[in-house]
Image (tube, grey):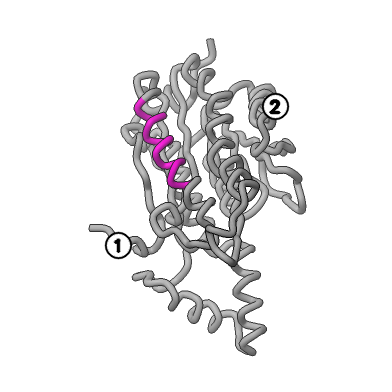
Amino acid sequence: MLRSPIIDDYRLKEPVVGELPGSRALVTGGTRGIGAAIARHLSDAGARVVVSARSRGDYDGPGHFVAADVATADGPNQLAAEAATHLGGIDILVDNAASQTRVPDGVLAMTDADWLTDLNGSLLSAVRLDRAVVPAMIAAGGGAVVHIGSNAARLPQPAALAYASAKAALATYSKGLANEVGRHNVRVNLVSPGVIETSALAARLQTLADEAGTDLDTARRQFMTTFNVPLQRPGTADDVAALVTFLVSPAASYLTGTNHVIDGGLLPTV
């Protein structure tokens, strides 16, 4: 039986942050934004990567692309099978795909369809894919799973409460799964980003700049004043990807069941 390279590494030598030679990784929602950055960082660290999304779009980053809709009941099983066949197994799983439905009139205007869209896209997508992938990790002697959550779980907005609720449930599920599979040397951690300047946010900022007749830097500063972020800037996809790469590496071999908030200090914690 093939063993997971990330298990052998930490037992045989001193762990080195960011080294993943020979590891096999699957990243959902991996063709843009945070997902694309995670795929690039994992590949740079030596991992072989499969990225998935509903469509490839203009993605030209590293890894083998598999088209899959993980928000459907059958999509995760199909993706897991294709990724495992291509890689020969999966040591690292990053559940990054998500769905956010915004209803300007607030939560009482949200329909069942709105709720089900976000629950399927932001919670059950991870539950189903874990169910398809983790048993093989257990059989191989271990692995690493990272769920991408959101600090919206703790700072919910009425217009996107279905999304926030799904991410809050994902946090609870992540902790429970970590408790269940830890004895099999499978680690499960949650990463909860705050305001991250992906292409979608950059487009929104450009729209704000155009409407105000100002430049992008000014629009960014004005936008950030609506948040109480001590670092006074949005994060980047690379910030999140670097954290994820650490969490799946042998250097993080004693971390599981944790929620790593990466929001520039936005959440009021002590």
Q: Distance between the residues labelled 1 and 2?
A: 41 Å
Q: What stretch is highlighted in magenta?
A: 167-179
- Label 2 sits on residue: 78
Does any portion of residue 168 appear in the rendered image? yes
Q: Quadrant of residue 176?
A: top left
- Measured as percent of width and height from the top left, residue 40 is found at 59, 47
User: 259 and 25: which one is in front?
Assistant: 259
Q: Which residue lies furthest to the front in this view?
A: 108
User: Residue at coordinates 61% horizontally, 69% vertically from top-left?
Assistant: 202
- Measured as percent of width and height from the top left, residue 265 is found at 34, 63
- Against 259, is 239 above or below? below
Q: Is mark 2 on a helix, strand or loop?
A: helix
User: 5 and 95: which one is in front?
Assistant: 95
User: Residue at coordinates 41% horizontally, 29% vertically from top-left?
Assistant: 177
- Against 210, is 47 above or below? above
User: Residue at coordinates 53% horizontally, 51% vertically from top-left?
Assistant: 162
Secondary structure mostly seen in magenta is helix
Answer whether labels 1 and 2 touch (C-beta < 8 Å). Answer: no
Q: Which residue lies furthest to the bottom in this view?
A: 213
Q: As shown in the figure, which amino acid type bears the numbered disc 1?
A: Pro
- Label 1 sits on residue: 268
Q: Earlier in the sequence, mark 1 or mark 2?
A: 2
Left or right of 150 on screen, residue 81: right
Q: Residue furthest top?
A: 1
- Against 55, is 183 above or below? above
Q: Quadrant of residue 24?
A: top right
* Residue 168 lies within the magenta run: yes
* Residue 257 lies within the magenta run: no
- Measured as percent of width and height from the top left, residue 78 is found at 70, 27
Say which mark, if any, is on residue 55: none
